[in-house]
Amino acid sequence: MRFLLLSGLGPANLNSPYLEGSLFTAEPSAHAREMVRRSGFASLALERFSFERSGRSYALLRPRADTTPHLTTVTLLSILENSGHAFERVALEDVWEGRAKAPAHDVDFVLLSTTYIWNGPILASAVRWVRENLPGTGIVTGGQFTNLKFMLALRDHPEIVAVVRGDGERALPLTLDALAGRGELGSVPNLVWRDGDNIRINPTEYVDLEEFPSPTVPGKTPIVPYESMRGCPFDCKFCSFPAASPKWRYKSAEKIRDDWTAYAEQNGADVISAMDSTFTIPPTRLRRLLEILPDADIPRWEGFSRANTLNSAQVVEGLRAAHCYQLHIGFESMNDATLKRMSKRVSVKQNRRAVELLSGSGLSYYGLFICGYPGENPEMFQDTQDYLLHEYSGHFALSKFSITDETMPLWQDKEELQIEADDPTNPASPWSHIGMNSDQAAALQKETLDKVRLTNDKAVLSLWQHDYEHWLMPRHDHATNIAVEKCLERMAMAPVDHRDLDAGAAVIRDNIHRLKDHGVELAPAGHALSVDPV
């Protein structure tokens, strides 16, 4: 019996339109080209910026050589490899883009991951691909969306024969065995399945993450994604993740160290990307990690943290000593009333303290903020905008609030906050609440991003950088890299920021000169630039 795994990321990047019209795009507009011509640098191309290191000329914008593998796919591939069943994989990204090719030989069942599927139409699109390319083939689903919407999925799609809910390490191989005639679906934990015209829901079991082996990764892999816990002890109202994985469990510090050491030895991993919603909890585990990781032969690593965990210089220095190089922190808001509405369980004071500690630490960090959470009005959001304009330093992202799921805990406040959404399952769907509507939030988001770019020299939007190596100048300090990125951002966005061609041309010239002060210059045409690691 042969299986086809369909797994991967979702179909859209909702933030990408923000760069339209800038020099970051492949085809700059006529307005942008004329502005560049008037700057006196008619042959300006961002990829020609370079710096010298050890006698070599390096491109400043070096294409990212390695991307982080998809955690769910890595986990599923490990489960399937160890199960002994024949399978192959098609990336869901190829399905969304119309590039996916069905296997030439027969497939008995399709295994569809819904971790990055967030609504019914997207699920229907994946099922339709199976129906059209592998007619008559049954589907087994698993992952975040069908963890929550298993009855809806089974109702709407007769092709789906079973849903694995929750942990799949034991349930998925047992499901495949049963489908192959070597067991009974009724005895598989975590399975919801069709029994003729009936739907059967089997009992739930949880894997012991401490005892169960972590995923194996084949071959050399520079970046390894890692999962140190399942579930979440917090109840942020904009997140439905805990509902899909209600039992919080986590691996010990010792297991994490041993796993990371193994990935370094067996896979040549240079980076571990901890994908947990909050890697720096619980406090007892963090303290132990800070004791045992500094002397461990592990790769450098990144992870997500809450602001209130970063409460002292000793913690931040301990993270750096433990080989952490980058943190992602969900600050969300700089208004205490909004944070309380979110049930974020942090304060503005704690958010501000975390940034103050990180800004001088040498650690890379990304602050994540939201505009338009239910109950927030423009006056309340002004606190976040003012902070980003006048105090924040480092990389940041500001997202317009979106409603992705009708099971989000925020719906508990529907009547009080007058929350309405045209389609509660579509992140792009219009919404409104007592404080503002989605159009107002979008306008505030754009206004804030524009103002921060033009007025705050130390805050850089995290958006365009993802295609390039991080850092752009890895042998230089955090402050230098932020300054270089700020110059690139202002220069590349000048055609968007300035309708007056001469004013924009002056901005381009000014930032080219500022880059030169940091050792970055435009390389002459034809001059070879290295894109190797620095």
Image: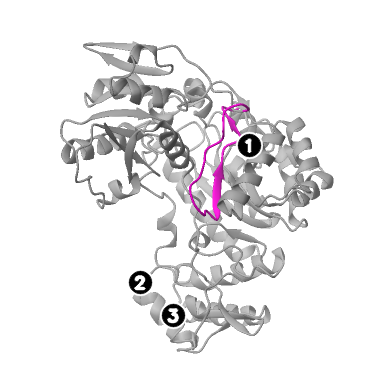
Q: Residue at x 20, y 31 (%)?
A: 137
Q: Nearer the viewer, residue 527 or 196?
A: 196
Distance between the Cα atoms at labels 2 and 1? 39 Å
Q: Is residue 494 left or right of residue 386?
A: left
- Disc number at residue 35? 3
Q: Circle 1 — which element?
A: loop
Q: Could you tell me residue 188's position as x and y percent?
A: 40, 16
Give the number of the disc on residue 278. Answer: 1
Whichever of callouts 2 and 1 sits on the residue coming sooner in the sequence is 2
In the picture, measured across the screen, residue 85 lies left or right of residue 280, that is left
Mark in the foreground, 2 or 3: 2
Locate residue 76 relative to residue 339 in the image: left or right. left
**Kind of residue at disc 2:** Glu
**Within the magenta stretch, is there residue 300?**
no
Looking at the image, which residue is at 40% across and 39% down?
427
Look at the image and tell me whether residue 306 can be seen: no
Q: Which residues are magenta?
A: 210-233
